Each structure stands twice: as structure tokens, then as C-alpha cells.
Amino acid sequence: MRTSARADEETTRRIDELAEALHGEAALVRDLRDSLVRQRGAIAAGDPDAINGSVDEIGRILLTLEQARVQRTRIVGMMAGMAPPPIERLEEILGNNVPPRLETERAALRLAAHEVAREAAINSTVIARAIETGEAFLQAIFSSAADPDPGYATSARKTIPGESFGIFCNRRA
């Protein structure tokens, strides 16, 4: 009986630990979503420093998220007593008795992940359009530089038959 109570305490502790891990991971995913929104604002404002800052911030968050995922996987593996299964298999591990707090945190993580996916898709489109616009702008600048100036077109000069035109030099020493 004593070992059963101990096992129950251990399971409860692991469930609480997993709920905290899911809560922290969901918070990181929401931070990532907010960073993507800020990045989009920086692109719209044409602020290269803010864009670079957002890229660095997103990179840091992604690294932290990977560490959080590893921690969550470790906890689930300890609960399962085997190689870490995916979080979707919690029902199998806990015998269809997933505590409400754990289910709430898992749902919050899923929701935050869907929001990040949506924001990342928007940013991808915004960045692609910004690149296209920049390329079109550069193309317009460089293509107009190659066009001859219409003020110096030879067809616009009046020529008098039989007369030649020379070079006019103004010498000053």
C-alpha cells in the first residue's frame, strides 16, 4: 500500500511538472507570436535595426523553445517509463485520465502554436512582397539609368545640309 501511495505522489508530481512545462512552453510560443508581429511592424516601417533585432529575438526564442520541448519530452518519457512518446499520447500514458490542468495547458500550447503558424505565414507573405517591391524599385532605377537622356538625342538636332559642325572649346588657363 505504501508503494502505491508513493507511486501516486510521484505521478502527481510529474503531472504538475508537465503542466508547468506546457505552461512555460505556451508562454514562449506566445512570445514568438508577438515577435513576429513586431517584425512585421518593423518591415512596414522600413526600420532595418528593428528588423535585425526581431530576427535575433526570434532566433533566441526558437532556441529556448527547443530546450523547453526537450524538457517536456523528458518529463513525458519519465511518466511513460519508456522512450518519450509524443504529448498526444497522454491519454494512453495516464489511462484516459488526463487531469484538467494538464489538458488546459496542452490546449493552450496548441492554440499558441496555431497562432504562431498564422503569424509566420503572414510574415512570409509580407517579406516576400517587400523583397519583390525592393527588386522592382531597383530594376526601375537601373533600367532608367541605362536609357539615354532625351535632351541629347541626335534626332532632335537640326542639321543644315552642307555645313559641318566642329568642337567648341573654351580654354582658360
Image (cartoon, grey):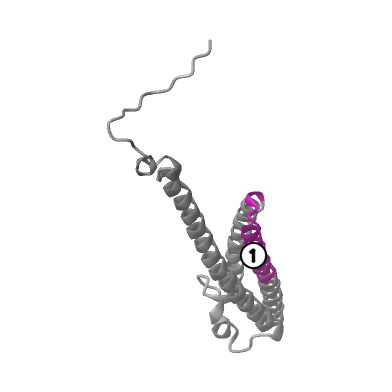
Q: Is residue 132 left or right of residue 2?
A: left
Q: Is residue 27 magenta?
A: yes
Is the N terminus in the top left, top right, bottom left or bottom right quadrant?
bottom right
Q: In this orientation, which residue lies closer to the viewer: 159 or 18?
A: 159
Region of the chain picked out in magenta, as a range? 24-49
Hey, which quadrant is residue 58 in on the image?
bottom right
Could you say where residue 48 lies in the image, as x and y percent from the top left? 62, 50
Could you say where residue 45 lies in the image, as x and y percent from the top left? 66, 58
Task: Point out the residue furthest to the left here.
Answer: 162
Query: Badge 1: how crowded within 10 Å, few (<14), some, or many (20+)?
Result: many
Q: In this orientation, which residue lies closer to the viewer: 142 or 70?
A: 142
Mark 1, residue position:
32
Q: Is residue 155 left or right of residue 122?
A: left
Vertical side of 109 occupied by 55: above or below? above
Vertical side of 28 occupied by 3: above or below? below
Could you say where residue 125 lies in the image, as x and y percent from the top left? 52, 67
Hey, which quadrant is residue 39 in on the image?
bottom right
Task: Point out the residue furthest to the bottom here.
Answer: 96
How many numbered badges does the structure rendering display?
A: 1
Vertical side of 138 occupied by 8: above or below? below
- Element under disc 1: helix
